[in-house]
Image (cartoon, rainbow, N blue to C red):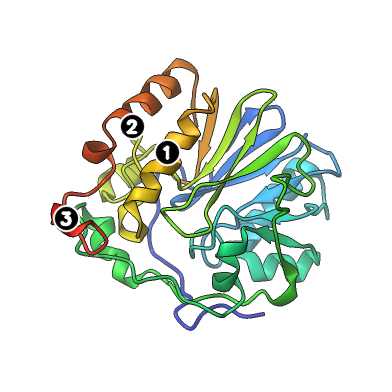
Amino acid sequence: MSYGDDYKFIPATSVGSGVGFDVLPDIYCHTIQIVNICLVGHPQSDDFVLVDAGMPHSSKEIISVIEERFGENKKPNAIILTHGHFDHVGAIIELVEKWDIPVYAHSLELPFLTGKESYQNPDPTVEGGMIAKMSAMFPKDPINLGDLVKELPSDGTIPHMPGFRWIHTPGHTPGHVSLFRDEDKVLIVGDAFVTVKQEYLYKVITQEQEISGPPRYFTTDWEAARDSVERLAELKPKVAVTGHGLPMTGELLASNLHLLVKDFEQIAKPGYGKYVNEKNN
């Protein structure tokens, strides 16, 4: 197993870094620098999973968070990836080496997780602030998890996550997925939409809550991204845990998600950038 040649620590953080809290009794969200990991399972249980794997060089923090919540030397049954961008797989090799557990991702994401294909370059020219301009330094090379990464079941179920199903939500990446539990309408979004303007340094640092589309500098298909947001809004989630920003719930989530669908072109899609349709440049 190996990270890409451009794997490195990224010097970005927020006021939420190192902070975690219960979203629901069995859903825990923890922020690592500028990205969230999610733990699904009741405290002190032996049955839980880790959703996404944080920033580069964050394995010790993730292990500490898990052992504090579930007990010393506990390990998740699996790691479920919403997608394979560097800030969602940053500690994954150290974690799977320690725990010897499987990783699951969408079939279209596997080339980026098995060393076969790099993501398209991030776009520092996209409309946005300082984080967007910094994105040229973000890793994009594929990592190689070998045969430890497996394809999510085609029937929509998620191994070790009873009651949840995965939903293909491309746009940000080809194989991006979001995870939904019909019983209580909790949605683990990944980066299909976020609750902070991820392109702007001030808003990332302060975690000012504001619904937005996927991070602009790494989103390459805006038509698919819009369709994915519409698909998620149709689920009428009551709780949304996003890859960036604070969770959003209840009427605030409903009204903001409705607004995002209604005004996607104005709220989410940048006015210019490498991956914006030519007619909008």
Q: Amino acid at mark 3?
A: Tyr
Residue shown at 62% from the left, 76% from the top: 114
Residue 239 % position (x, y):
55, 27
Circle 1/circle 2 CB separation < 8 Å: yes
Residue found 24% across the figure and 65% down from its top: 124
Residue drawn at 30 percent across, 70 percent down:
136
**Disc 2 marks which residue?**
260
Q: Is residue 214 visible?
A: no
Q: At numbered mark 3, what does the secondary structure look like: helix, strand or loop?
A: loop
Residue at the far bottom in the pictured view:
5
Quadrant where the C terminus sits is: bottom left
Question: Against 135, is 39 above or below?
Answer: above
Mark before the other along the chain sequence, 1 or 2: 1
Q: Which of the marked residues, 1 or 3, is nearer the chain's N terminus? A: 1
Which residue was labeled with disc 3? 272
Q: Residue at x 51, y 79 (%)?
A: 4
Position of residue 224 in the picture relative to residue 189 (left or right): left
Residue 7 appears left or right of 271: right
Where does label 1 land, which residue?
A: 229
Q: Secondary structure at mark 1?
A: helix
Three-letter code for the amino acid on which mark 1 is drawn: Val
Q: Position of residue 44 (x, y in %)?
A: 82, 38
Residue 200 position in % (x across, y down) = 26, 49
Few, some or many C-alpha atoms within 10 Å of disc 2 (few <14, some 14-19, many ≥20)? Answer: many
Name of the residue lying farthest toward the right: 46
